[in-house]
Image: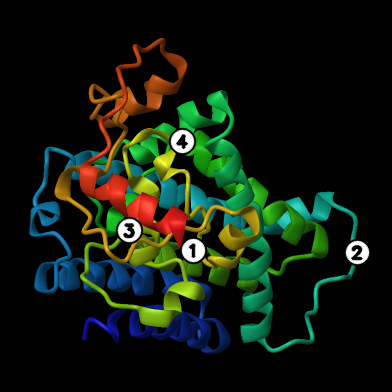
Amino acid sequence: MRYLYAPVFFFGFIGAALAVAMNTHLCWLLPLLMGAVAVSRLCERVMPFKSRWNHSQGDSQRDACHALINEALTWLSVFMVVPLTALLPDTGLWPVHWPLVLQLLMAIILADLGITLVHYASHRSAWLWRLHAVHHSVTRLYGFNGLMKHPVHQMLETLGGTLPLLMLGLPVPVAALLAFSVSVQLLLQHSNVDMRIGALRHVFAWAPVHRLHHLKYGTHGDVNFALFLPLWDRLLGTALHLPDYALRDEDVGIGDRPDYPRTYLAQLREPWMRSEVHPPAVLPAALRQALARRAQS
């Protein structure tokens, strides 16, 4: 089950979404997404990567608020596809004659590149980082963390990922399937399931790949930015794989902001507030050694 979980979850739910889009109304994607959330939560209980990460640290209500608001913004953006495309020149470039699955694949690849570049820039720009820090303030990783973003940063990532698609003439059904696929991927990317993905780590940025991005030790977490495809990290030179390092419970968060606000409204305000930066967290000896071995290889 640990080897099957990620591919079955990913292809199972996205395959079901394609079936919905081709045979029924798109509104059924929302109950299907709720089913994906339920399966994710159940499997995190049955096969946890870190048992401690299954227990609330006073963050469950806050994370639910982030998830509800950000998912609402995501699906609002789907409804805005028609009026937005009406404002843009009709290029006629979108391959509407392709099978729906190939249109979705094209949308995922192009959107992933845009989202990854916005994500990468968010670790380089001080202003963008203040918005993005909300996402990195988590001190445990589980499925809902993928939906925990400042809504302004969420909109910037959405714009970076979808504007090129809109200019190509993105159809509404493909936009809805893309939104669904992003949500499924975020559940997998931040999952607390003890999944084993083997060579698939070269193809999909699932949890075993992405967890290192949440390291709290300064710039050591500036790795593995991609949402779907690790290919972009290899091109950016930011791919990291540490098979001999066992991630600790306390390795995630923002090392120089142990006092980062924990409530929803305070996190919405934080990017606009002046805050004190603390000394960076000390790099654990085992992680330092793993990084040194990788540098030598």
Give the residue pinned by disc 4: 132
Disc 3 crowd rating (10 Å Cα; few below 14, some 14-19, many 20+) is many
| Residues at circles 3 and 2 in contact by the CB criterion of under 8 Å | no
Q: Nearer the viewer, residue 178 or 197?
A: 197
Q: Is residue 172 visible?
A: no
Give the residue pinned by disc 1: 182
Q: Nearer the viewer, residue 135 or 73?
A: 135
Q: Secondary structure at mark 2?
A: loop
Q: Secondary structure at mark 1?
A: helix
| In front: label 4 or label 1 | 4
Instruction: Please state the horizontal and vertical placement of residue 253, each as a whole percent of the image.
Output: 28, 38
Q: Report the Cα–Cα distance between label 3 and label 4.
A: 16 Å
Q: Report the Cα–Cα distance between label 1 and label 2.
A: 25 Å
On residue 167, which mark appears?
A: none
**Amino acid type at image mark 2:** Thr
Q: Nearer the viewer, residue 89 or 158?
A: 158
User: Viewed as shown, does residue 61 lie left or right of 156?
Assistant: left
**Amino acid type at image mark 1:** Val
Q: Report the Cα–Cα distance between label 3 and label 2.
A: 37 Å
| In front: label 1 or label 2 | 1
Instruction: Please state the horizontal and vertical placement of residue 79, each as a whole percent of the image.
Output: 60, 57
Residue 282 occupies quadrant:
top left
Q: Earlier in the sequence, mark 1 or mark 2?
A: 2
What residue do we see at 42% from left, 52% from top?
71
Looking at the rendering, in which quadrant would you find the N terminus?
bottom left
| In front: label 3 or label 1 | 3
Q: Secondary structure at mark 3?
A: loop
**Amino acid type at image mark 3:** His
On residue 91, which mark appears?
A: 2
| Residues at circles 4 and 1 in contact by the CB criterion of under 8 Å | no
Q: Nearer the viewer, residue 205 or 32?
A: 205
